[in-house]
Amino acid sequence: MNIDGFSRALSTVQLATQSLLATLTRHPKRIAGTLAVLLLGTGVTAFGVAPLAPDASNLPVRQIVEAVQPLPSQSQVDALLDHKFNLYRTEITRSSDTAESLLRRLNINDSAAATFLRSDSKARTLLLSRAGRTVTAETSDDQRLLQLSMRWATDDDTQFQR
């Protein structure tokens, strides 16, 4: 198709679109009525034809029996056992939190992390000094702590701290 043929086709489509829009604006109730009758007619036809279908209980039933060989599963089990993943959990600190209670709520089973949180004064001050701080923990699949981060708003609420 060349440029001249394309421009003629485009002008024909534009003319048809303008004609359709003019008809829609002049006769909106007629067009809506026609669409309603069409939809109602197809619905009535569907309900009228549905009883003509054969009853499903009278259709013949065939049973096919075939032995199925399972795929070797040991390689899949080995791949699943070797797969490692990290879990992320988030909690809000409470005023009554201890290192153990916070780690328990985060579902962390890591005695080294609990010992560090109890013994390090900076960690203890940041984590356990105030309620309402958001704590996010990244753990391994065996519930050992990999990363612990905390976020909170400062006292003037214009800065967000990490």
Image (cartoon, helix red, strand yellow):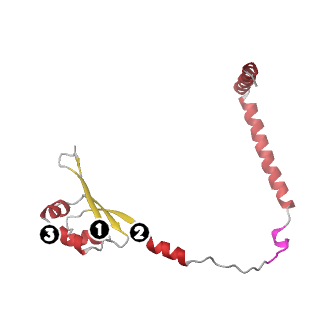
Q: How far apart are marks 3 and 2 (CA)?
A: 30 Å
Of labels 2 and 1, earlier in sequence is: 2
Q: Residue 145 carries which label?
A: 1
Q: Do the residues labelled 3 and 1 touch (CB within 8 Å)?
A: no
Q: Which of marks 2 and 1 is in front?
A: 2
Q: Which residue is drawn at 84% across and 61% down?
A: 51
Question: Residue 38 location, x and y as percent?
Answer: 79, 41
Residue matched to label 2: 84
The residue tagged with tag 3: helix, strand or loop? Answer: helix
Question: Which residues, given as a range, are shown in magenta?
Answer: 55-63
The residue tagged with tag 2: helix, strand or loop? Answer: loop
Q: What residue type is labelled 3?
A: Ser
Q: Residue at x 75, y 33 (%)?
A: 31
Graded by Cα atoms within 10 Å as few (under 14), some (14 to 19) or many (20 or more), the crowding at tag 2 reads few
Q: Which residue is drawn at 22% across and 73% down?
A: 112
Apparent side of residue 162 relative to residue 77 in the rendered image (left or right): left
Question: Residue 111 location, x and y as percent?
Answer: 24, 75
Quarter of the view holding residue 122? bottom left
